[in-house]
Amino acid sequence: MMASSSTQLGDIEERFFECSFCLKTLTEPKTLPCLHRYCRECLQKIIAENRDAFNCPLCDEECDVPPEGADGFKTDFFIKSVLEFCQLESTFKEDNVKRCRGCKEVKNVICYCFKCRDFLCPQCYQFHLDNDMVEEHRPHLLDLQTVDVRSLTLEKLTSLTEDPRCAVHVKRPAEMCCQTCGNTPICVACVFGEHKGHVTHEVRVLAKSEGKKMKAMMTALDKCKDKLYELPKRVTKVREALQENVKEQLGEARSNHKRVTERVLFNAEMEKRVLEKQRNEIIMRHKEGCKQIREEMEEKMRELTEKYDEILQGKEQSCGREVEEVNTKTGIVDEKSSAKVEKYKRELQGYEEKVKASQVDNEGRISEVADHATRTINRYVNITATARTVQASHDEWTEAQCLPAITTAGVVLIEEAKKEFGDLESLSKTGVTESWMFIEQVMITDSHESVVDIKGIAEGWDVQGITSGGDGHIIVTGEAQGDKSHITVINREGGIVRQKQIQGLADSRYTPYHHCHSLSKHITVTVCKSNQVGLYDNRNGGYVSKNIKDMPVVWPYFESCVTTDQLNNIYVGGPEREVLVLDDQLNYLRTIKLPKNIYMPRDISVHANYLVVCHWSAGESYAVTMLGEESEVVYQFTRPINGCRCPLSVCTDSSQYIYMIWNGSGRCILTQHSQDGRQLLATRKVDDNALCITVIGTKEGEKLLVATQNSKKMYTFGLLEE
């Protein structure tokens, strides 16, 4: 409720005078430091359960219990006087025949004396007006004939009530305030007696000083108003976003699960059909053999019948064993596929439990913010209402006693209101960051499945990078003629689909080596040693680029490698420790600095939450962190033996296995590392001119492609799931 000097008593809401503990009208109101009021008896009940300190039932602010208990809290004399008048107001509505304070007779009354605290008849009212014995009563007379009680203002009521008396000499009027004792009313004698040595002020000076402090506090508090009322809206928005994101996240996981299950069952069915064909072929061969034997038996001498019967029996047994072997394999396929389906089902259930548990945790933290917002707003409403009500009284005693507590509570509330809750929006997403996906054991075939020549690349050109594109196409990049580089789209057979030559930048003094990595299904990001980073459309050959020197970053000389992550962020490695992070529109985001012993990476790849770095000059590969400006080494990869010590290229498959090409001593080795990167699982000998590697998806599953630099060949290795 907003109060002013013209505020009428009838306009004040009844709940303003209600005790929040017993929900009844306040009696002997006591004020806490947070400005919430309670009946003295109610406060004693609260303190009985909390001896040293307790939390305000309304705003949850902690309050220390004074040594005097409930009596140690300040009595709200202003509210107490308003309550006394409100109780009198009900008697004003009744019959005006009451007992007169002066003559003690029951008769018609026309006045109420706030000094006598009782009603007066016409004769005694006139006596108060005429007789100098009761001269001090005249400012405290309320003529019931000429005033409308319901329109009585706070300012008028304050002028009628009697000023406080000395807390020690109760018969003497208070003329000063003792600030040391909480602005307690005292007389002049107490300044040199009970309150000697204390800080005392004239009530007018103190009221004016406290009024200025409260005005400054109210101005600061009003600036927080919009922020306070905006917080519940943010909470609602975040809660709705959380529900929607959980729904979308679980929907994606279930869709993934359905796709994987269908794939397993489909593969099992295909394998069973192959086995069924084998079984039929065995039976057909058996029938043909038996037929031939019977024809031979008829042509040859009858004495050989017994011998051929034995041969026929052997064939029958052999056929039975072979058919039984095929039947056994068929059963194994059924068992494996059923086990996989059941395994994926359990994994999905566990994933859903993690997501829902994270949702419950986020809901709890959101509710805490919502509760904080509600409590803070309630305190704001209470403080502002109390402050404006006290100001509306225009009574110096009331202001001197009430304003310090209001200002103190307001300062505390301002600090509460400044809380930013900067991580509130992050609660709209669960803490389960990874998507549900199945992970199989993957093995590289012992040797390459195929090798093709990469056609369409002219003599003198080379291959520096390779990556997968949409529609089963493959993108290769490298140096072209002169100061140009090329981007070439090929198919699985090495045939050219389309090609584009890129002119190097005029101010570049470096050979235009070109590297690439898939950004999306149809877009490839490329970097060239001439400080050029671009986006190439695999479908139509469209190309846009930017010069890194035009970005708001100090860049050393040239780019050496490029990769992307699941959020379509682009990572560009250079000749020193810097790795640039760009968005999918080639806008600069930030810079990551590799650890001090790692510089000029030959190739990089994002793996889970880490960046895999091929440190060619040191002959090592590392997994480093990507958060913050300075990255740290998480682990170092195991090098292959046989003298291969320089890592050239790195990639990962959908199951998060890591593959690298190493060279040294005139030979190249392909390595497979575990999903956590800490184990070397397999090595394969590859072409000594091999330079780059990537993974491509096919109808038969994922394949590993290895491209050579100068001979321009592409080897395909199978990735077998077990």
Image (spheres, rainbow, N blue to C red):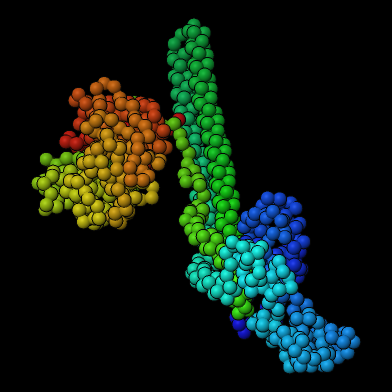
Q: Closest to the observer: 483 or 19?
A: 19
Residue occupying the far right of the picture? 105
The mark tally for this picture is: 0
Q: Which quadrant: the C terminus? A: top left
Q: Quadrant for residue 706, please give it.
A: top left
The image position of residue 89, as x and y in percent, is 77, 82
- Between residues 334 and 461, which one lies in front from this camera angle? 461
Please state if 250 lies on the left or on the right of 501 as rendered.
Answer: right
Whether residue 408 is visible here, answered yes or no, is yes
User: Which residue does the image show at 18% across and 43% down from the upper left?
Assistant: 513
Q: Position of residue 306 (x, y in %)?
A: 52, 8
Quarter of the image that includes the N terminus:
bottom right
Q: In this rendering, does residue 417 appear at all?
A: no
Q: Compared with residue 649, is residue 322 higher up or lower down, i.e. above or below?
A: above
Residue 386, image quadrant: bottom right
Coordinates of residue 627 in the picture (x, y in percent): 37, 44
Left or right for 203, reference 329:
right
